[in-house]
Amino acid sequence: MEINDDLFSKVEKKTKVSKEDIISIAGRLNEGNMKDEKTLSGIISDLSRLTGVDVSKEKEEKIINLILNDKVPNNIDKFF
């Protein structure tokens, strides 16, 4: 599936995260073990840095626990 540049432009405009960074993180998600705390922590840290949103250690642990325990909603609307 090819994602067009218009979508990347919209995401970059809202988040200030470049197309290259999005593709890099997506690649790490595909290659990494999403049940590995170290992988998840690294991705959360990178996203925090890229977006300029501070994520406390407590919040990071909550996010990791949600993912490890399959508590992330399948419906993206519920996530927001």
Image: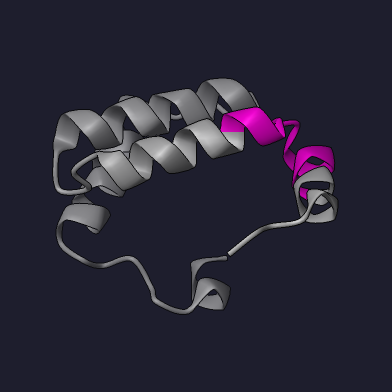
Residue 20 vertical position relative to residue 66 in the rendered view, above or below? above
Residue 32 appears left or right of 23:
left
- Residue drawn at 84 percent across, 40 percent down: 13
Q: Residue 3: where, in percent of width, then height?
A: 68, 57
Residue 57 appears left or right of 18:
left
42 drawn magenta: no
Q: Residue 44: where, in percent of width, then height?
A: 40, 33
- Residue drawn at 15 percent across, 61 percent down: 69
Q: Main secondary structure of the magenta part?
A: helix
Residue 12 vertical position relative to residue 56 in the rendered view, above or below? below
The image quadrant of residue 20 is: top right
Question: Between residues 34 and 27, which one lies in front from this camera angle?
Answer: 27
- Residue drawn at 65 percent across, 59 percent down: 2
The image quadrant of residue 58 is: top left
Question: Between residues 53 and 8, which one lies in front from this camera angle?
Answer: 8
Q: Residue 1: where, in percent of width, then height?
A: 58, 65
Question: Between residues 76 and 33, which one lies in front from this camera angle?
Answer: 33
- Residue drawn at 25 percent across, 57 percent down: 66
- Provide the residue span drawn in magenta: 11-21
Residue 55 appears left or right of 66:
right
Number of marks drawn: 0
Q: How is the image coloured?
A: one colour
12 drawn magenta: yes
The image quadrant of residue 51 is: top right
Is the C terminus in the top left, top right, bottom left or bottom right quadrant?
bottom right
Q: Residue 50: where, in percent of width, then height?
A: 60, 24
Outermost residue on the front side: it is: 2
Residue 35 vertical position relative to residue 60 in the rendered view, above or below? below
